[in-house]
């Protein structure tokens, strides 16, 4: 019984002070993609931004949010996005895509210096179920995208990036402190998706 108490206490201590490497491990276990694999897309030559340009990235965001806002099978999922309009969501995501995939720093220009995704999403009690649904919609948007249709390299690495990132956000949410919020000032503890 004494050993069991020590094991439980050490797990609680580890859980309350997860390192970046621990978060990366959790994201890898949940997504099947390592941190290093997720970054390949940001190092492609030519970059995603150069391949599909502004119009292609806005198209990707629109395809994704068309799927989200028309998701009749999981209305709970749409509720996650209820704090913004579809157009606002498309615009924010487009800016993030441009900056992440090799273009100018449009996201930082709008959101400011602190653009950590986990902090931006801390107001939403997002769980694994929501991350999986998000990834399903994003993968479908990538597959549907006219400019990515024949670019298997880009599609493969974008899907890995998005799967890893969605699950990293979920892992990080558990350890988010109030001083790390960059998307708002309160965590919505009443909803878990």
Image: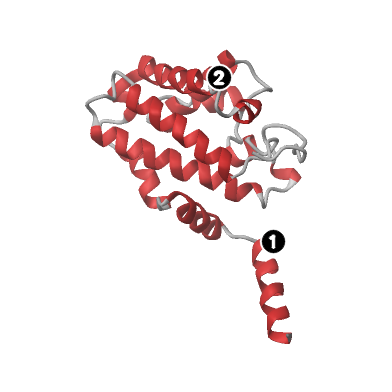
Residue name at image x 40 percent, y 16 percent: 59
For marks 2 and 1, give the one nearer the viewer: 2
Residue 5: tell me if it is visible.
Answer: yes
Residue name at image x 60 percent, y 41 percent: 118
Residue 116: tell me if it is visible.
Answer: no
Residue name at image x 22 percent, y 26 percent: 150
Element on which disc 2 rests: helix
- Looking at the image, which residue sits at the far left? 150
User: In the image, which disc is placed on residue 66?
Assistant: none
- Looking at the image, which residue sits at the far front? 73
The picture places residue 167, in percent across and down from the top left corner, at: 52, 46
Q: Disc 2 versus disc 1: distance between alpha carbons?
A: 35 Å
Q: Name the residue under label 2.
A: 69
Q: Would residue 135 be found to the left or right of residue 88 on screen?
A: left
Classify 121 as above or below 64. below
- Decide which of 161, 31 is in the foreground and name it: 31
Q: How crowded is mark 1: few (under 14 residues within 10 Å), some or many (20 or more)?
A: few
Instruction: Classify residue 52 by image quadrant.
Output: top left
The picture places residue 80, in percent across and down from the top left corner, at: 64, 29
Element on which disc 1 rests: helix
The picture places residue 111, in percent across and down from the top left corner, at: 61, 26
- Decide which of 30, 13 is in the foreground and name it: 30
Residue name at image x 43 percent, y 19 percent: 63
Q: Quadrant of the C terminus?
A: top right
Q: Quadrant of the N terminus?
A: bottom right
Q: Name the residue under label 1.
A: 16
The picture places residue 171, in percent across and down from the top left corner, at: 58, 50
Classify 56 as above or below 180. above
Classify 180 as above or below 46. below
Q: Residues within 10 Å of mark 2 (few under 14, many from 20)?
A: some
- Numbered circles on residues, count: 2
Q: Would residue 117 be found to the left or right of residue 15 on screen?
A: left
């Amino acid at each position: 019984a004494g050993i069991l108490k020590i094991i439980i206490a050490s797990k609680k201590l580890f859980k309350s002070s997860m390192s970046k490497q621990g978060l990366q491990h959790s994201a890898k276990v949940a997504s099947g993609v390592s941190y290093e694999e997720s970054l390949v897309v940001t190092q492609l030559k030519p970059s995603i931004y150069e391949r599909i340009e502004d119009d292609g990235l806005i198209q990707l965001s629109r395809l994704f949010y068309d799927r989200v806002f028309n998701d009749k099978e999981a209305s709970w999922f749409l509720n996650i996005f209820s704090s913004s309009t579809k157009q606002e969501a498309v615009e924010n995501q487009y800016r993030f895509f441009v900056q992440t995939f090799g273009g100018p720093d449009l996201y930082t220009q709008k959101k400011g210096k602190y653009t950590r995704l986990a902090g931006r999403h801390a107001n939403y009690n997002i769980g694994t179920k929501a991350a999986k649904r998000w990834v399903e919609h994003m993968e479908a948007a990538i597959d549907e995208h006219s400019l990515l249709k024949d670019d298997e390299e880009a599609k493969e690495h974008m899907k890995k990036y998005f799967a890893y990132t969605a699950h990293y956000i979920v892992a990080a949410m558990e350890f988010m402190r109030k001083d790390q919020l960059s998307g708002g000032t309160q965590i919505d503890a009443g909803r878990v998706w």
